[in-house]
Image: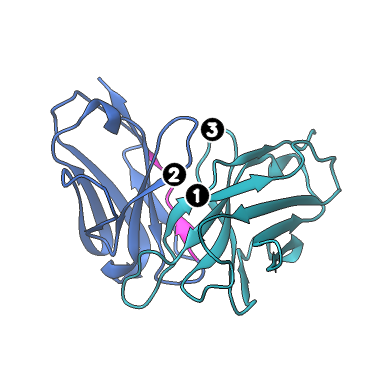
Chain colours: A blue, B cyan
Amino acid sequence: EIVLTQSPGTLSLSPGERATLSCRASQSISSIYLAWYQQKLGQAPRLLIYGASSRATGIPDRFSGSGSGTDFTLTISRLEPEDFAVYYCQQYDTSPYVTFGQGTKLDIK
Amino acid sequence: HLQESGPGLVKPSETLSLTCTVFTASITSGSYQWGWIRQPPGKGLEWIGTIYNTGNTYYNPSLKRRITISVDTSKNQFSLKLSSVTAADTAMYYCARLGDFCSGGRCSTMAYWGQGTLVTVPS
């Protein structure tokens, strides 16, 4: 099983700042099989990024994904108030078997 | 697009049974797969399993012995059964549609989710 480790556990930033969230895989995965989700309190997760860097429908371009091998990054260029949430990475290199990271909470500073 | 239903309280050692009703798409469509994901209170997401329109099922190895996912095409629904539950199975259970966004021929991302249903197993 591929284990995804996200860091930091909590990230405290202010609106307008840049956020960088990390996802590290326990073994190398193809970058096209990495996705990111956003989950707000009391809501289901929302797909943001798939294929490591492609945005899902309706996702603002301040969200971007990058990375390869075992290290992947979700960047939010300028934080909006609605971006404060929990973010999960997901690998589907072993599709249909998939795993999620444990999440990074993005807090308002 | 999807809605979960089922009992909110299940006794230890019994079987948890949930149903997901699919709207706006046919469950027999070859374009999609259908999955279950759960989230214990205050914790992260855990993939439970996925069913394809062919009827093929794929389960999380850690839960495989206790899970059955099936489809009812007449009702456009798919279902989850988890046997021998314990308090560790207490979670929000989500159903989801996979296949809207693919890369490299693999489509196991989840673009549409139900709102989730909380299932509690008392200790």
Q: Label 1 crowding class (10 Å Cα cut-off): few <14, some 14-19, many 20+?
A: many
Q: Are marks 2 and 1 in contact (CB under 8 Å)?
A: yes
Chain of residue at mark 2: A
The correct choice, above or below, for A60 with respect to A12 in the image is: below
Same chain for labels 3 and 2? Say yes or no. Answer: no
Same chain for labels 2 and 1? Say yes or no. Answer: no
Q: Amino acid at mark 1?
A: Trp
* Marking on residue B113: 1
* Range drawn in magenta: A98-104
Same chain for labels 3 and 1? Say yes or no. Answer: yes
Please give left or right for residue B7 compared with residue A65 in the image. right
Please name the residue that numbered disc 2 is placed on: A45
Please name the residue that numbered disc 3 is placed on: B42
Which of these two is toward me, B117 or B49? B117
Q: Label 3 crowding class (10 Å Cα cut-off): few <14, some 14-19, many 20+?
A: few
Q: CA distance from mark 2 to mark 1?
A: 7 Å
The correct choice, above or below, for B58 with respect to A102 in the image is: below
The correct choice, above or below, for A18 with respect to A26 in the image is: above
Quarter of the image for residue B64 reads bottom right
Which of these two is toward me, A24 or A79? A79
Q: Residue at x 41, y 33 (%)?
A: A40
Coordinates of residue B36 in the picture (x, y in percent): 59, 56
Q: Nearer the viewer, mark 2 or mark 1?
A: 1
Please give left or right for residue B74 compared with residue B47 in the image. right
Which of these two is toward me, B108 or B43? B108
Coordinates of residue B68 in the picture (x, y in percent): 73, 64
